[in-house]
Structures are given as C-alpha cells and as structure tokens.
Amino acid sequence: MLLAHEGANVTLYERHGQLGGRSSAIEGETEAGAFRFDTGPTFFLYPQILRDIFTRCGLRMEDTITLKKLDENYDLVFENGPSLKVTSDIDVLEREIARIDLQDAGRVRDFMVDNRAKFRNFIPVLQRPFNSVLDLLRTDMLRAFPKLRPLASVDRDLSRYFRDPRTRLAFSFQSKYLGMSPYRCPSLFTILSFMEHEFGIYHPVGGTMAVMEAMGQAAQQLGVKIRLNTPVREILTRKGRATGVLTDQRSEQADAVIINADFGRAMTKLVPDRKRRRWKNRSIERKKYSCSTFMMYLGIEGSVPDKGHHTIFLSESYDRNFAEIEAGKMLSEEASLYIQNVCVTDPHQAPAGHSTLYVLMPVGHLRDGGVDWTDETRAQARSLVMARLEKAGFTDIEERIRFEKIITPADWEERYDVHKGAVFNLAHNLGQMLHRRPHNRFEDIRGVYLAGGGTHPGSGLPVIFEGARISSDLVIRDLASRRRFAFFNRRSRKGATHVTS
Ligand SMILES: Cc1cc2nc3c(=O)[nH]c(=O)nc-3n(C[C@H](O)[C@H](O)[C@H](O)COP(=O)(O)OP(=O)(O)OC[C@H]3O[C@@H](n4cnc5c(N)ncnc54)[C@H](O)[C@@H]3O)c2cc1C
C-alpha cells in the first residue's frame, strides 16, 4: 500500500490462494453451514499504526474495517483460582487484583504510570531502522536506555511492584505473544500488558482475515498487482544486488525485492547460502527461536455463553510448564491454554445455533531431539487439550464438536512456511533485537528489504505494520536516490520504481 501510494510499480507474490499467511482464515464447511476461524492473531492491539498507514495512502481504515473494542479484555483463570475479569478500566483492574493480593492492587497505578513513561520513551526507537551498532547511540535510544533495565526479565522487573507471583503473571503472560517466557523475556516488554490496559483490545468484525482482505483491496485500489498461488522459488541477484524473483512461470525483474516470508525459511529456501555473509544457514541455525503452538479449531453445536471472548488459562506450574516448552523435548502435562470464544462478540463466525472455539496450547518449536509430531503425538496433544479445557471450565465441549481442525508445529513449518514452526519468529532476547535482528534494509544483499516478524521491530501485528512502514520508507528513499543518481548521470533507468514483494 505504502509503496504503491508513492508511485512504485508493485507486484505481490503469494504462495497460497488467499492473502494473510498466519493472519488468514480457516474455513470449515459442515452440514449445518460454514465455520470461520482466525488462524493466528486474535488480539488486535494498538490499531493506530494501521490507521496511520491507511491515512498516509489517502484512505480511511474505518471505511473497510470495523474494529470492536472489547468491554472486557479477557478472563484470566488461574488453575487453582482466582478467576479475574480483566478490563481496561483501572478501577476494575485494581479491584480484581485485590482478589489476589491487596498490597499488589495498591501498586497497579504505579505500574501504569512508569510504563506509560517507558512506552513514550521507547516508541520512537520502534519507529526507525537499526542499520548498525551506531544507531544505538542516537538520542532517542539514549533517552530510552535508563528505562530499559537491560539485564532484568519481565518477571524480575514486575517484582518491583508486585509480590504475589500470580499478580506478576497477570502482567507478564503477554510475553507469550512473543513466544517467550516472562522469566527470560527482556523487561522492556512489560509495555505489552501496559498497552492492553491503556489502549484496550479490539476484535476486527469478520476476524483478523477481514483486515487482511481490506488491506488486499486497498493495495489493489492503489495499483498493486496481486499474484495468488505464485510461490517465489528464488531471489535473483547479480553482483550482490537483487535483480528480481523467479517463479514457476518466469523470472521477474525488479529494482527492489521485499521479503515478507518468514525470515529463516525464506533465507534457507530462496537465497543460496554462498550469497549471504552474516546470515549463513549455520548462523540462522544457531539463533534462538520463539515457542510454537498446538492449535485446535472447533466448530461446536450450541454456544458457550458463560465464557468471555478471550480466556487465558494459566497453569498452576506456569514456570515449569514454560521450562518444558523451552526445552521442547516433550509435551508439558501442565499446559496453559488460550481460548477464543469469538461468537459472543461476532456470531456470524459460525452457522446459526453453533459457535466456534479456537484453542492454543504453547509447545516447543521443532528441533533435533524434540517432540516428533507423529499421528500418535497429535492424538496425545489433543487429549491433553481436552483435559485442560475441562480444567479451565469449558465442560461438555467434546460431545458437541461438529467441525475440528488441528495445526501442529510441523504443520506450521510445512503448510505455513514457518521456520522450525516458531510462529513468533526469532526470539526477542536483547541479543536478537534492534541492530542484531535481520535489518529492514537487508544487510547481506543490496536491493533486498525485509518485512514481517523476523526483522526489526519484531513479531506481532502492530509491530509488523510498523516494520513494514520502516522498510517501505527505506525503499522509497533508496529508489529516489538511485533515480537522482541516474538522472545525474543522464541515464534515466526504465522501470526504476518497479518493486517486487
Ligand atoms: C497461533 C498464533 C497466534 C497469534 N496471536 C497473535 C495475536 O493475538 N496478536 C498479534 O498481534 N499477533 C499474534 N500472532 C503473531 C502474528 O500472527 C504474526 O506475528 C504475524 O502474523 C506474522 O506475519 P508475517 O507477515 O511476519 O508472516 P506471515 O503471516 O507468515 O506472512 C508471510 C506470507 O508469505 C507467504 N510466503 C511464504 N513463502 C513464500 C514464497 N516462497 N513465495 C510467495 N509467498 C510466500 C506466506 O504464504 C504468507 O502469506 C500470532 C501468531 C500465531 C501463529
């Protein structure tokens, strides 16, 4: 959208028959009618960035996307109690936290005030590229640094406010959005829970796919050519510069190539190892990766009216559960779950008299010596989810299932092209953030730019939109300066703004 709006000639190649990737929809036809599920993202946070992108393109996001702000953010169910109703109203939040610990409730406002300042300081850093270590020395970074507490984890930082581990979990389970444990995730990310309480959680009517469809239409309206069912097989280069892409049909020339495919997967499949300097297969292999997920998409007869839109069920042994996920050697019996019961907000996602449940169980990513996702492991994981669903208060579900689909880490890798099935991409430890994450202007091949969770600022939709904006601005700037250079040399190059994504 951004590139086409600036006048670039953009072609988008998508391997699948629909746009969206991890944000696409799963549809299930049954005798009763069609069920529709979000494949991945269900928490739509901080829509300001997407709204700004539409505005910059001369469009109004609200014309094609309906976002419903949820009255209640989520039900937070601790395995052995209590169950909290979390809203963005701080008075209510204090009251709910008081059910865990009165003293902790008294610190909620301090947490919000401190994180508001941290968020304000850090946001400029997330809005610009990090092309080298020198970018760490810019004033915005120096201003943000004192608030960073780089050696502390999210959990440790929270212990400055909250003494009960369950309160800390209520403000730190969000590190799972990055596929990380709160005991290892850098303290910067306390801003995730802050953002939920400060700005609320949205549901796009029609599911997250409705946002992708609206963006696809907007892109086409701005002149982007979309080629579905067209996998890119190779990024073409000459003398260290990208010259286009190879598809099954032909090779396409371009002045810039933007890779939005999963970073590890795209590099190892689309760019020969010898053409990369920093990001060799060996170094990609050695990186730390986020966790993966075992997913169940259930179309059920009847509804689950006593449950909210989002339920977070937190295991009594959350730390051990996460240690087992990180080790990735076996399925953790003490699994935590996230459940979306979308029909309480958006009943059209299921046929009349039915509803859907989306169940996510975090599991380890694929690795040597890790869980082997055979049919037997799948069945074992399914039984585990069913048992944990009962524990979370979702009783009598199994006999009402009329549609069911499962996605395992192996499916994420094979069908969704996610390297190691690590759905939240490279981990977000400090050693893999900022200039140490693959750069937006890709450092190994001139003319290649990255978008998506594998580049700066990182994974999660709002952050990915921000990263796309950073990369688009770099492309526009670089192509403009190449054009000026060409003009200077009196050799205006034909098609100099042709961009392939
Ligand atoms: C289960 C789950 C739950 C999540 N929950 C949330 C949430 O609640 N909120 C949130 O903000 N984020 C959430 N996320 C994270 C979010 O989904 C991801 O960060 C984001 O969708 C990743 O987007 P991406 O553009 O990086 O990659 P993708 O969505 O994977 O997009 C890459 C695209 O490239 C295409 N592609 C790959 N290879 C090729 C090729 N060779 N040729 C052509 N096309 C190709 C793919 O088909 C795909 O369409 C969740 C993720 C998962 C999996």
Image: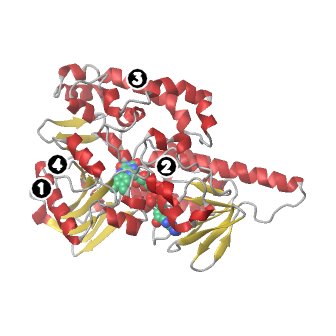
- Label 4 belongs to which residue? 334
Disc 2 crowd rating (10 Å Cα; few below 14, some 14-19, many 20+) is many
Disc 3 crowd rating (10 Å Cα; few below 14, some 14-19, many 20+) is few
Residue 83 vertical position relative to residue 233 in the rendered view, above or below: above
Residue 465 vertical position relative to residue 107 in the rendered view, above or below: below
Type of the residue with mark 4: Glu
- Contact between labelled residues 4 and 1, with CB atoms less than 8 Å apart: no
Q: Considering only order in the chain, which callout, 2 or 4, is on the residue closer to the N terminus?
A: 4
Relative to the observer, which residue lies in front, 453 or 180?
180
- Label 3 belongs to which residue? 114
Residue 319 in the image, given as x and y percentages of width and height: 23, 40
Measure the C-alpha gap from mark 4 to mark 2: 31 Å
- Contact between labelled residues 3 and 1, with CB atoms less than 8 Å apart: no
Q: Secondary structure at mark 3?
A: helix
Q: Considering only order in the chain, which callout, 4 or 1, is on the residue closer to the N terminus?
A: 4
Relative to the observer, which residue lies in front, 170 or 88?
170
Q: Secondary structure at mark 2?
A: helix
Relative to the observer, which residue lies in front, 282 or 247?
282
Type of the residue with mark 1: Ala
Relative to the observer, which residue lies in front, 151 or 311?
151
| Mark 2 vs ligand 1: CB below 8 Å | yes
Q: Is residue 492 visible?
A: yes
- Label 1 belongs to which residue? 387
| Mark 4 vs ligand 1: CB below 8 Å | no
Left or right placement of residue 267 versus residue 409 in this view: right
Q: Is residue 1 visible?
A: no
